[in-house]
Image (tube, grey):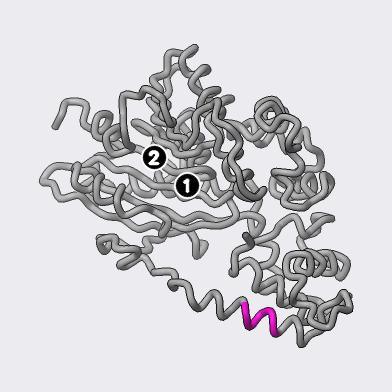
């Protein structure tokens, strides 16, 4: 189902009337592109009148009841009425919380700490009580690189880690398409190095650092864990001189590769003849629109060029024998049947499927890299990220 915060900026387009020719305000245009990058079909970073019209058609298809006079178009009055209804629905939902007191979490010891110049280059930090330097676990949120924030972090995991004596940070990073890939990865790298640079001040053991996250956040975590050392010892910036290597990594629903051929190889047999990949993953877009979005996000001219960028950030391509242990969780068994429900539900199920973990486990096993794969019905040494981190960050049982 389309989220209200996604609907509202698109409805603003309709307020210009059918076949609007007006240029959108830059702030409004940026919001639309952030939520729906594929709307920019020609990849020029702007919404042309034709692209606005195409978006209007999508809204009409989603909300046909808004066309109260049945003329096949939304008048400004009809658009405004639909917007009012959407806002009313949104007002019935809980207002997103700020860092302090978010979803029952304890107040961070350090909230909205800036690690970069952008407004999203911030993190919250909770310090475990200890006379000795504590390990640190860094949470990296998901959201398809297009949404999400540090507030997505679950209070149960936070409390479990703190109780275990592990300090915890949760970061936000810049989102596409306002920035191009691989900027979110580099933001997370900077956050990790920044925290290490403050280890003495915050009573953190910089030699015991873990990263964890789900979906897009999992991709970033695995990139950090499996990349070679990215510190620059000659940099004039002391943050850049800090190590990027981590002790261990944990993921939930993580995509171990997003290369087109890899997805086709593993998704098509799962879908069988009932669905096509375009139907499930496309969200109503044509193949051309999907390709345009992929090229835009990776700032590429060809699919080959985009896949080359993706490959450089894929766990399956990066993992090597000297890499740290990983704990992977998925919500379904590899042979699970397709779920009932709408295509959006099926899409979420498919892009977080356990085949991603199965393939990484095969590669890790061949390289003798410690790995633990958990899914429904699987035998696994660990029941949770907290348990895994306790074992790896306190190797002597301290």
Return the residue nearer the eye: 15 or 98: 15
- Dot 2: element: strand
Residue 346 image point, x, y percent: 62, 44
The answer, for residue 20, to whether it is visible in the render is: no
Where's residue 273, x and y in %?
A: 75, 31
Q: Give the position of the N terminus as an image quadrant.
A: bottom right
Q: Residues within 10 Å of mark 1 (few under 14, many from 20)?
A: many
Query: Image point 42% across, 53% down: which residue?
Result: 171
Count neighbours of disc 2 (C-alpha within 10 A) and say few if under 14, some if 14 to 19, many if 20 or more: many
**Does any portion of residue 39 appear in the rendered image?**
yes
Q: Which residues are magenta?
A: 81-85
Q: Relative to 104, does residue 159 appear above or below in the rendering?
A: above
Percent across and percent down for residue 240 are 44, 43
Where 24 falls versus 292 (above or below)? below
From the viewer's perspective, tell me whether residue 191 is left or right of residue 3: left
Picture residue at 43% right of the left edge, 43% below the top: 213
Q: Which residue is mark 2?
A: 211
Q: Earlier in the sequence, mark 2 or mark 1?
A: 1
Q: Give how far across and how far down residue 369 sits, in percent.
A: 42, 18
Residue for badge 1: 188
Q: CA distance from mark 2 to mark 1?
A: 10 Å
Label 1 element class: helix
Residue that extends furthest to the front in the rendered view of this protein: 340
């Amino acid at each position: 189902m389309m989220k209200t915060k996604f609907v509202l900026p698109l409805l603003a387009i309709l307020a210009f009337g059918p076949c609007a020719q007006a240029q959108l305000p830059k702030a409004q245009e940026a919001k639309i592109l952030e939520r729906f990058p594929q709307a920019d079909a020609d990849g020029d970073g702007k919404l042309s009148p034709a692209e606005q019209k195409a978006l209007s058609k999508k809204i009409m298809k989603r909300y046909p009841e808004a066309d109260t006079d049945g003329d096949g178009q939304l008048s400004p009055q009809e658009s405004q009425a639909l917007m009012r209804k959407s806002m009313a629905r949104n007002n019935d939902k809980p207002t997103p919380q700020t860092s302090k007191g978010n979803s029952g979490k304890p107040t961070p010891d350090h909230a909205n700490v800036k690690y970069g110049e952008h407004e999203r280059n911030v993190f919250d930090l909770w310090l475990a009580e200890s006379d000795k330097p504590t390990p640190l676990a860094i949470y990296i949120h998901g959201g398809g690189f297009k949404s999400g924030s540090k507030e997505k972090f679950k209070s149960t995991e936070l409390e479990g880690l703190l109780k275990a004596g592990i300090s915890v940070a949760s970061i936000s990073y810049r989102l596409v398409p306002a920035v191009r890939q691989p900027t979110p990865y580099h933001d997370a790298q900077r956050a990790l190095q920044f925290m290490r640079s403050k280890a003495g001040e915050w009573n953190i053991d910089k030699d015991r650092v873990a990263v964890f996250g789900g979906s897009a956040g999992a991709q970033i975590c695995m990139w950090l864990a499996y990349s070679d050392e990215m510190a620059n010892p000659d940099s004039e910036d002391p943050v850049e001189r800090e190590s990027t290597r981590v002790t261990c990594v944990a993921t939930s629903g993580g995509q171990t590769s997003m290369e087109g051929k890899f997805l086709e190889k593993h998704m098509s047999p799962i879908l069988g003849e009932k669905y096509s990949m375009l139907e499930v993953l496309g969200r109503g877009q044509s193949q051309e629109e999907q390709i345009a979005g992929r090229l835009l996000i990776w700032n590429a001219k060809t699919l080959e060029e985009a896949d080359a960028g993706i490959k450089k950030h894929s766990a399956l391509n990066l993992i090597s024998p000297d890499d740290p242990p990983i704990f992977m969780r998925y919500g379904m068994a590899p042979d699970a049947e397709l779920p009932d429900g709408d295509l959006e539900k099926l899409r979420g199920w498919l892009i977080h499927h356990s085949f991603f973990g199965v393939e990484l486990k095969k590669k890790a096993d061949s390289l003798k890299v410690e790995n633990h794969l958990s899914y429904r019905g699987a035998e696994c040494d660990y029941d949770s990220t907290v348990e895994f981190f306790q074992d790896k960050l306190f190797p002597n049982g301290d």
